[in-house]
Amino acid sequence: MEISKCKSYRDLSNLVADVIEYILALPESKLVLPTGSTPTGLYKELVNRELDWSNVTTYNLDEYVDNTIQNQSYRYFMMENLFKHTNIDDDNIYFPGDTAVWPDMNYGVGVDLCLLGIGGNGHIAFNEPGSSFESETRMVDLTEETIKDNSRFFPTIDDVPTQAITMGLKPIMSSKRIIIMANGKHKKDILEQAMYGDITEDIPASILQTHTNMEAFYCD
Ligand code: PGA
């Protein structure tokens, strides 16, 4: 397993956009998508490419519970940054918490590509340190560190929700292919620990080392 070091954030976004372009061209495809600051360049690039999103179903990794700041919901983020600029069918967009889709989210059935960011503490989606590698999609409490990290998107830290629904590590690992992206020097150590260190529930992303079709992209 090697971490691919990209020349720039733009380069990273373009490389991952190439993979998604390939997935979108399949007759029917399923994509799992992240939110956060890391994928914004990728989503911009995908919008610029004016691709055909009519054959894809997307599942987002996570969503806050009891969020009172509506323009910080992950659904809002995805609509603004990606979906509303594409021809994706609204009925093909799913978030955890949409009851109808939970069985699918639980088993990761037939997901062609799962795209991930990595948290400063090694979380993927909202699977915080200590999450079982066997975890299913579920409601979780966010850690102090994650609440602090995410407070940059909210008016005050008290506005950050303390719970979320997250796709579990087991369904994530059921995806046929996984890409993890990390942008910035502050993510270098945790990405290296996750990719090269011990496989441990203390660093949820370390489970990815056991996936047979996984790539990691990093830029400074
Ligand atoms: P970021 O978050 O893309 O905003 O760095 C990643 C994550 O916490 O999963």
Image (cartoon, rainbow, N blue to C red):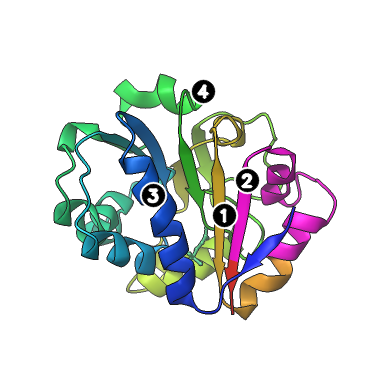
Q: Earlier in the sequence, mark 2 or mark 1?
A: 1
Is-magenta flag for residue 195? yes
Q: Crowdedness of circle 2 by 10 Å Cα count: few (<14), some, many (20+)?
A: many
Label annotation for residue 1? none
Are the residues at dot 3 and dot 4 in contact (C-beta closer than 8 Å)?
Answer: no
* Residue sitting at x 47%, y 73%: 11
Residue matched to label 2: 214
SS at mark 4?
A: helix
Residue matched to label 1: 180
Name above or below for residue 48 compared with residue 61: below
Q: In 3D space, how far apart are the residues under numbered discs 3 and 4 (Cα atoms)?
A: 22 Å
Q: Earlier in the sequence, mark 1 or mark 4?
A: 4
Q: Position of residue 1 (x, y in %)?
A: 75, 52
Residue matched to label 3: 20
Type of amino acid under label 1: Ile
For residue 70, side relative to residue 113 (left or right): left
| Segment tinted magenta in the rendering | 191-217
Is-magenta flag for residue 142? no
